[in-house]
Amino acid sequence: MNFEQVTLPFLVLHGEEDKVTDPEVSKALYERASSVDKTMKLYPGMWHGLTAGEPDENIELVFGDIISWLDKRATGKEHIESFLPIPTYKKINLDEFQGGRARASL
């Protein structure tokens, strides 16, 4: 597997008692990915369906972790600009991008 090619920010969530997919694969992705911004969260006692089939309090915990992760990355102009993958173009005017009128010039 080419985990080293993963460079975008990511969040891995995995139940430690998952019998469908091996948590060790998620651990390998987290450890080997080249991403600077990566987060891994293992849930003790939880299975494969983290957002379905678990008790309500577990599902709320998982969704809370997802929302928290997204919130931290969705605030702050500088943080958003650092993830715009446009190496061959001049920097996008972030205000235009957020307004739905993204334009890049050569």
Image: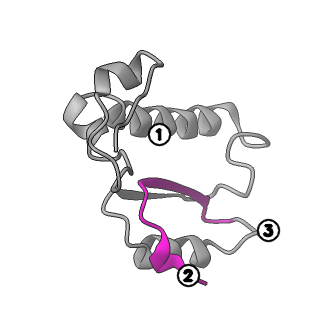
Question: Does the magenta-highlighted stretch encompass residue 8?
Answer: yes
Query: Callout 1: helix, strand or loop?
Result: helix
Residue stretch in magenta = 1-17
Which residue in the protein does label 3 denote?
20
Question: Does the magenta-highlighted stretch encompass residue 35?
Answer: no
| Residue 81, x across and y down, in percent | 27, 39
Q: Which residue is drawn at 40% across and 29% down?
A: 103
**First reached walking from the N terminus: tag 2 or tag 1:** 2
Which residue in the protein does label 1 denote?
65
**Corner quadrant of residue 39:** bottom left
Amino acid of disc 1: Asp
Please state which of residues 23 and 87 is positioned toward the viewer in this rendering: 87
Q: Is 7 positioned to the left or the right of 76 in the image? A: right
Q: Which residue is drawn at 38% across and 30% down?
A: 71
Q: How crowded is mark 3: few (under 14 residues within 10 Å), some or many (20 or more)?
A: few
Whether residue 53 is situated above or below residue 46 in the rendered picture: above
| Residue 44, x across and y down, in percent | 55, 59
Q: Which residue lies furthest to the left in this view?
A: 78
Whether residue 21 is situated above or below residue 97 in the rendered picture: below
| Residue 27, x across and y down, in percent | 50, 74
Which residue in the protein does label 2 denote?
2
Q: Which residue lies furthest to the bottom in this view?
A: 1
Q: Residue at x 30, y 20 (%)?
A: 95
Q: Residues within 10 Å of mark 2 (few under 14, many from 20)?
A: few
Disc nearest the viewer among 3 and 2: 2
